[in-house]
Image (cartoon, helix red, strand yellow):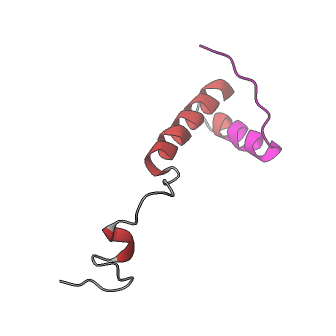
Amino acid sequence: MPKVEINIPEHLEMQIAQLVEKGEFLNREEAIEDLLSTGLKAYKTSGPQDEDEEPGFEEDGMMGHDDEYVF
């Protein structure tokens, strides 16, 4: 497995240490790997939207009206 070195803010390091102390993870390496993996999965499902996309029905109503649906 490739090794990566990162610098993180102190508050994140403290939160990771607390999760390990509580037994949520076996060690820091497992915690960071799992949290990073979870974050990447979440990013893929709700990541940035393409700005070139046209708005869908759910964003502007069925006929382009903001607050009403036309049948």
Task: Indicate left or right for 31 with 10 as reference.
Answer: left
Q: Is residue 11 above or below residue 29?
A: below
Q: Quadrant of the N terminus?
A: top right
Task: Indicate left or right for 30 with 63 as reference.
Answer: right
> Magenta span covers which residues?
1-18
Q: x and y percent of residue 29 in the render?
A: 65, 25
Residue depicted at x 31% and y 86%:
68
Q: Nearer the viewer, residue 16 or 42?
A: 42
Task: Indicate left or right for 46 with 10 as reference.
Answer: left
Residue depicted at x 59% and y 29%:
33
Say if the magenta span includes residue 61: no
Q: Nearer the viewer, residue 51 or 37?
A: 51
Q: Quadrant of residue 24?
A: top right
What is the tally of numbered marks visible in this picture?
A: 0
Q: Is residue 12 above or below residue 70?
A: above
Q: Quadrant of the C terminus?
A: bottom left
Q: Is residue 61 above or below residue 16?
A: below
Q: Is residue 25 above or below residue 57?
A: above
Q: Residue furthest left?
A: 71
Q: Is residue 24 visible?
A: no
Q: x and y percent of residue 67 in the render?
A: 37, 85
Residue depicted at x 71% and y 44%:
15
Q: x and y percent of residue 46 in the render?
A: 47, 51
Q: Nearer the viewer, residue 47 or 35?
A: 47
Q: Is residue 60 visible?
A: yes
